[in-house]
Image (cartoon, rainbow, N blue to C red):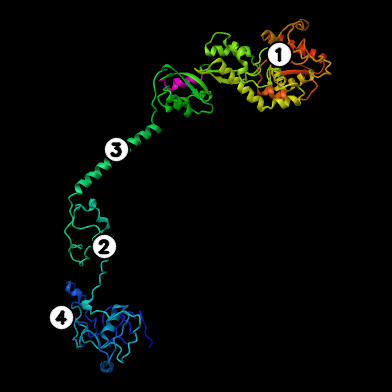
Amino acid sequence: MPPRAKQPPPRGTLWGFMTEYGRGAGHEPWHPEDPLYGDQGWAGQQAEQGTQDPYGGQPQHYQQEPQQYQHDAQQQQYQHEQQPQPQQPYYDGGQHYAEQQQYGHNGGWDTPQQQEPVPYGMNPAADPYAGQQPAYGADGNDYYAAPDAYPPPQPPNQRRTPEPEPTAEWDAEQEAPEKHPFFTGADEGDDAEPDQPREPRRGRGGNDRRGGKPKKKSRNGTACLFVAVVLVGGVGGLGYFGYQFYQDQFGAPEDFAGSGTGSVEVEIPKGAGLGQIGSILARKGVVKSSGAFVSAATANPKSQGIQPGVYPMKKEMSGKAAVDLMINPSNLNALIVKEGERNVGIYEAIDNKLKLDAGTTEDVAEKEFKDLGLPEWANDDPDIKDPLEGFLYPSRYDIGKKSTPKSVLKEMVTRAKAKYEAANVEAEAQRLGLDSPMQLITVASLVQVEGKYKHDFEKVSRVVYNRLKPNNTETVGRLEFDSTINYIKAESRLDIGAVDSLRQIKDPYNTYDIKGLPPGAISNPGADALHSAINPKPGPWYYFVSVTADKTLFAVTNAEHEKNRRQYEEELEKSGQ
């Protein structure tokens, strides 16, 4: 039979040569001479523990095997003893199989002696396995030996599970959590050094596994007190910051009461939102917190109309008072230049904003216009009344404490110059057959005033260019615009008088008298008028008249124009003008 290593037969199963009696498949041994007969584990441990025998301590007798079987077994035992048996390693995969392997050889630990059967459940005084007959291997061959089998086992009454030898790694793993004196309570001057190797465990008894003196607990109270103080402080800090967070997110923001006192100038940049405006006001001392302003502005729908610019504010204002002041355009310290406005009116507005004497800004413009940054092609005609006309670009200009007439005028000219450069007026004027970019700005100023409504600008621009043509037989090269007469007189009238009387006015800006364009602009055109002057709508028109606020009639001949004029007069009568 070939050797089988590490695969023992199941306990109680007849396989090969087992004990001379064999074992049944039941839970109890079936013969009094079976080594396990009456045994409750090794050496009758249940009897020592005072457990009760389930069979009442009575021996269980079973039918003997035939004598022939016993005789054959004894003969095999005799033959086995006569032959020297080498010590063979074997597989100890099962407890019962190990017992059979151990006591089936003549070379066991004790001299084989005949053992009287012990009643089941009784604790024998001597080793119940001493002197048992060999269970197998009587022919001298160990069929279960293998090169990698386990070494022979110890006797059952001496078997103990070997405990692992302590190693440095094991000791470090076991002792790591207790090394620091904060947790162990040991003094820093304790005899046991942290890196000193400790004695191995002595066993399972109650002795100290380190074999040293007991731990000191002198610092446990102090450590607990320290931890408690830290926890209380941490909870208090968290509570404070939590309260601050709640106040910032959900609580009412800090705010002043009333309309404030004193005065302070605040400049709001372009594109600033409510949060940024509130921060600027808070830094200036106008409101107590940005949240106060934001809360009040959110509650007021008109706050969306707050414009960038310079605002004269007061200090320590409530959020609501600050919002109410800023949503009122009259409180914005800024100058608004309207499209088509003349320079005369702009000069007066600057004097009022800066609280200067009347005529101060006009005097500065007349004397210092060359220092304001006009383009080289500006003021190219000696008959130009005001070199700055057409260069005070329509927009809003913030007025601060440091503002002067010159600084405000220079800012306006700089903006106009940038707009004209962006429109490429020099190249466009050449394309349109004009003598200079200044003439293009003049056309735009005429369109701005004569057109009145933006949806008519492109047609009005075409009328200007058609009248400037040399082959113009309707007006013979004259523009004949009432707006130029009003510019001369510094007026804004609709009924300027009869044509014959108007032609008697000798002025280079009188388009009823001169042919072509006036020397310079008569107003400050906006972006729409400039665009229409550059891109006139194609058409044959020479005349136009606005009969209603949203209706302008254009005509090619003078007869058609007179018909449109009568309709205009009828509209005036209906309106009571």
Cα gap from disc 2 to disc 4, whole angstroms: 42 Å
Q: Nearer the viewer, mark 1 or mark 4?
A: 1
Most extreme residue toward the left, as rendered?
A: 125
Q: Quadrant of residue 179?
A: bottom left
Q: Earlier in the sequence, mark 3 or mark 1?
A: 3
Q: Callout 2: 10 Å neighbours few (<14), some, many (20+)?
A: some
Which element is circle 4 on?
loop
Q: Quadrant of residue 195?
A: bottom left
Q: Is 325 inside the magenta-drawn segment?
A: yes
Magenta segment: 316-328
Reading the image, the residue beneath label 3 is 236
Query: What percent of the width, then of the height, locates residue 69?
Result: 28, 92
Q: Nearer the viewer, mark 3 or mark 1?
A: 1
Q: Nearer the viewer, mark 2 or mark 4?
A: 2
Q: Earlier in the sequence, mark 4 or mark 3?
A: 4
Reading the image, the residue beneath label 2 is 171
Q: Residue at x 67, y 21 (%)?
A: 376
Q: In the image, what residue type sits under mark 3? A: Gly
